[in-house]
Amino acid sequence: MQRLNSVDPQFAQGRTKELLDTVQQAFGVIPNTARVMANSTAVLESFLAFSSAMGSVRIGAKLHNQVKLITSETNSCQYCTSILSAVAPSAGLSAADILSGRSGNSEDLRTKAALAFAHDVLETRGKVSTQQLKSVRAAGFGDSEIVEIVASVVLGCFTNFLNNVADTTLDIPAVEPLEATLATA
């Protein structure tokens, strides 16, 4: 059972209503996670601004979403993994790309290095080793892309932590657990 309230858009007022209307216009629906965020106008507004700004990352929408997927898997956030998997095709991800993001494995060495680095950032809480940083640089990532990978992890962690705390009710189909998906791949 969900542990934090979801704001009903019909009863929202002021800036919160404006922000929820923006979400509705952008996605055609207001995901339950946005309704939970709407408990704080500042949080919803910050999330939307951060998400919007990350839409123009140099690493590209595909890798940005794959980093958020590995972050969601690592943080055991079923809500985020499910919603990211559902919207991934609109960011240009194939089923194989989604699986790569969730598992951290990729045929593409550059993607694999970025996902490994994202996982390292999570596991070390940002205190990556010099070798881990050298590895992602060797894969062709400069400082701007490394900053974007870290920001993608942070954005993912925010939604993961909030949805894990709230135990946000899924308003989309649940994604299969990674182990089951890998077994059928």
Image (cartoon, helix red, strand yellow):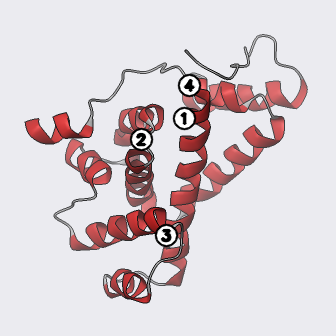
Residue type pointed to by label 2: Ser
In the picture of the structure, the residue carrying the numbered disc 3 is: 58
Q: Mark 4 points at which residue?
A: 168
Residue placed under numbered mark 2 in the picture: 76
Q: Which amino acid does label 1 sit on?
A: Asn
Q: What residue type is labelled 3?
A: Arg
Q: Earlier in the sequence, mark 2 or mark 1?
A: 2
How dense is the environment of label 3, judged by Cα within 10 Å: few (below 14), some, or many (20 and up)?
Answer: some
Is there CB contact under 8 Å for labels 2 and 3? no
User: Closest to the observer: 13 or 154?
Assistant: 154
Which SS class for mark 4? loop
How far is mark 2 from mark 3, CA to CA?
27 Å
Q: For mark 1, what is the residue? A: 164
Residue depicted at x 54% and y 35%: 164
* Residue 184: percent from left, percent from top: 9, 35
Residue at 44% from the left image edge and 83% from the top image edge: 129
**Quarter where residue 27 is shown:** top right
Name the secondary structure under disc 3: loop
Three-letter amino acid code at the position of disc 4: Thr
Q: In this view, does 143 lie above or below 24?
A: below
